[in-house]
Amino acid sequence: MSLSEQFYLEDDAHPIDMVESLAQHHAWEFERVADDQIAMAVEGQWRTYSITLAWSAQDETLRLICTFEMEPPADKLPKLFETLNLVNDACWTGAFTYWHEQRLMVYRYGLVLTGGQQAGSEQINTLINAAVTSSERYYPAFQLANWGDQSPEEALQVAIAEAYGRA
């Protein structure tokens, strides 16, 4: 059965229910944190990514946060922030930020579904895959900016080609 067939007959399928089914389908580790939130681990080529999706009924938005650990030396933070700006200029969906206190690199995206719109399972699957693909693509650039002797522009050159792997 395809991912979309699982929810075809359910007009009011909750987005987090769909995410849970996708996690089961892909055999990702997950935990249903609440009725409107799920956390999972998705193995990439470079890292295991922690992904949380939360549904906000108030503003009808499905929020995705994908994190991975990043502990840059304090003197490299300006290079990291410059690299973040360059990466975000290249990202058409989602954006990266660095949470210094938690030592986490964060990719986040909000899918707005106002007016009672429904996200399909393929759309949610694409959303998760885009987060992992973007993280995989730019991870080496963040590493080079933090621990290499390259400028942010040089570090970003490694991310020009699409990353290949599994999500």
Image (cartoon, helix red, strand yellow):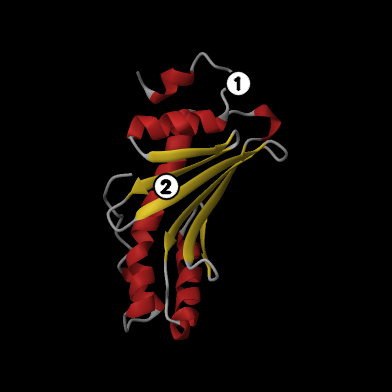
* SS under mark 1: loop
The quadrant the N terminus occupies is: top left
| Residue at 42 percent of width and 68 percent of height | 70
Q: Is residue 57 visible?
A: yes
The residue singled out by tag 2 in the image is 130
Q: Residue furthest toward the top?
A: 9
78 in relation to 126, above or below: below
Asked whether, in this view, residue 11 is left or right of residue 129, the answer is right
At 48% from the left edge and 20% from the top edge, which residue is drawn? 7
Name the residue that disc number 1 marks.
12
Q: Is residue 155 above or below residue 18?
A: below
Q: Of helix, strand and loop, which one carries label 2? A: helix
The label on residue 133 is: none
> Image point 44% across, 19% down: which residue?
6
Residue 102: % across, % down: 52, 66
Residue 13: % across, % down = 56, 23
